[in-house]
Amino acid sequence: MYKNRIEIIKKHLDVNSQTTNNKNEVLEKELFNSIDANINVGELKLLIDSVEASKYKDAAREFIRNHPKFKENFIGLDMATYRQLVLEQCVAVANSGLIHLTDIKNNLHRYAGVVEMFSLYNNNVCTKLGVHYTLFGGTIMFLGTSRHEKYIEDANTLKTMGCFAMTEIGHGSNVRGIETTAHYDKQTKEFIIHSPTPTSEKFWIGGSYLHATYTTVFANLIIDGTNYGVHALVVPLRCPKSGAIMKGITIKDCGHKLGLNGIDNGQIRFDQVRIPRENLLNKYSDVSEDGVYKSQFNTPIKNFAATMAPFIVGRMAITKGCSGAAKTSLSIAIEFSHIRKQFGPSANNELPLITLSSQQRRLMAPLARTILFDLYIQRLTNELCQEKLPASIHAHCSGIKAVYSWFCVAALQTCREACGGQGYRSANRIAEFKNDCDIVCTYEGDNTVLMQQLAKYLLGVKQKQTNTTTNRIYLDGEDAKSLLFNFSNINQLFETREEIRLAELKQIISNSKEPAYFAFNNAIPWAVKLGFAHMTKIVFQNSINTLKLKNVKPLAHLIMLDALVSIEEDLGWFVSNHLISPNVAQSIPFLIQDLCFEVTKVSKQIIASFDIPENCKPSSKDLISDLF
Ligand SMILES: Cc1cc2nc3c(=O)[nH]c(=O)nc-3n(C[C@H](O)[C@H](O)[C@H](O)COP(=O)(O)OP(=O)(O)OC[C@H]3O[C@@H](n4cnc5c(N)ncnc54)[C@H](O)[C@@H]3O)c2cc1C
């Protein structure tokens, strides 16, 4: 038995040995070969940037490289100075013509591509841009009508800045529970915006404490005592000319935060603030001058769903913050590992950290996943640009936002540790990214809540399906490498896992004797697991489709590496559910290590393909030696 195991291990350690009985397709054959050290960086860059966004991204890179505001130091600035710098950077971006407020609806590739580039630099800039362009701009573009076009011109150049006031002290995730009111006054043809309780005060509103002129407020629309549910209205916070805060409005600072201290988050109280009737964003519902409410939907819940729907674009866009932070931090950690030497075969022959198997394992796996997540976001962006959105779009934007941000937070911690003590120095940038990105797990929808939206969508799809069971697979045999280096087997594993997870969730809910809310409540951890299973599967399938269209090296290796890491993350489950035999399972860490070794050989070229402007990271020399 012991001998047998050593044989298996020996087999796996040699990634170059072509197994004779492998019947794999052309694409998979590549996995059995060593990666050619001369990968085409330009081709890889285009793949990661996407054909649709490439020119916009290059323009943004040029801007970041050259604009003086992006050469200024932001590390260790006090909050007031930092907020001012971020404002000036955002104004510079707005005036550059790189993006336009209408892009969120009319040119999503440009908007998302440019924001991603700023996230290579710093998440404060892209968050402030995101609040203004995606959230404020998004509500105007998607919930407004021609009567709201007047806000666009000044907002586009940041002559006026907008913010987005949904969250309240009392309610964050449960938006339908918010308390702010918008009473309609027929006599004056105005809405009266009011915070009726301390818990109804808006909280966390990015940009509101110092800079925003307007906000879109989410409030309960009430006419003659009837509450028609949550609607969005434009409310001026400050006088566009003088900048003075408008009558009836009080804004306080949310204070110092774990990260994003370049953003002025504020707490807003409305005291009977009057705004014209026309400020209601009336794409789906409107109130006539004499106070008659009309909606395209027959129930407040449907109107609410339509009001929330546009924010799926924001969820997709926010993943760009994760993408940039992960790419820059991985680049820093990988460059550091190529330079920094510790230990070696002899005292006078110390070797770079990157030669350590642990360093390869820690850094290559997140490198692969970052690229595959980016490819998946390209697909979502294309879907969001279609005239008719796929039914899955909301669930998938929620899902990718959750899994990418959770992954990003873990990957940034890995990068920090991979640089040892130097990773802890603010000047080396990873710490800043780590603190700034942490919140992506919570804002724009808390991840655990979003995963439930995805699970509920999957349950709904299942309900409509008639018996579609995947053939169960059991990976067992001597030649684990051939069994696993097989995209169709991996796909079947992921399909089956999702199917089992879905059936399990359905059963937990239907076995419950409790009312629907509690029945689902008991099943939330399983809903989250189902969400992970589904996202892993579709990210994998999208990567394979991309590979079939563009076999850019080393994509095949990155896909297999990420797939095996995903399986390893849930290995106990795969084995206990009889999808993978213990023997095959034991080989997985070895195959992962082999693939990490292969990817490491071209890791410098991979990070070169990110084309990160030099001022987004410390120079590789400074990473170690600027202390001397
Ligand atoms: C830096 C920052 C910037 C922000 N910017 C803005 C902004 O510009 N505009 C704006 O409107 N809002 C903004 N927010 C608010 C943000 O969107 C909310 O924080 C978020 O929606 C979560 O709400 P909450 O903080 O009230 O948490 P809660 O909803 O109270 O959640 C607390 C915990 O309970 C869990 N939980 C809650 N409900 C469920 C459930 N049904 N199932 C399982 N678990 C659950 C969550 O997972 C979480 O762990 C910002 C927040 C921060 C921190």
Image: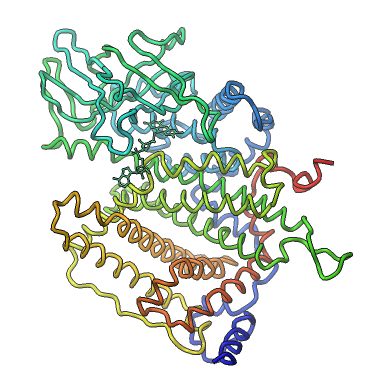
The residue that appears at 22% across and 53% down in the rendered structure is: 520
Vertically, is 238 above or below 412?
A: above
Q: Quadrant of residue 294?
A: top left
Q: How many marks?
A: 0
Can you name the residue that lies furthest to the right here?
A: 348
The residue that appears at 59% across and 80% down in the rendered structure is: 32
The residue that appears at 49% across and 25% down in the rendered structure is: 255
Q: Quadrant of residue 591?
A: bottom right
Q: Position of residue 38 (x, y in %)?
A: 70, 67
Vertically, is 308 above or below 586?
A: above
Drawn side of residue 358 relative to residue 539, left or right: right
Q: Position of residue 16 (x, y in %)?
A: 64, 81
Q: Nearer the viewer, residue 86 or 5?
A: 5
The residue that appears at 68% across and 34% down in the rendered structure is: 66
Q: Quadrant of residue 222?
A: top left
Q: Position of residue 546 (x, y in %)?
A: 47, 64
Q: Nearer the viewer, residue 164 or 451?
A: 451
Evaluate whether residue 156 shows in this view: no
Q: Position of residue 162 (x, y in %)?
A: 42, 24
Drawn side of residue 67 relative to residue 299, left or right: right
For ligand 1, which image quadrant applies?
Answer: top left
Evaluate whether residue 158 shows in this view: yes
Position of the C terminus by quadrant = top right
Position of the N terminus by quadrant = bottom right
Vertically, is 276 above or below 298?
A: above
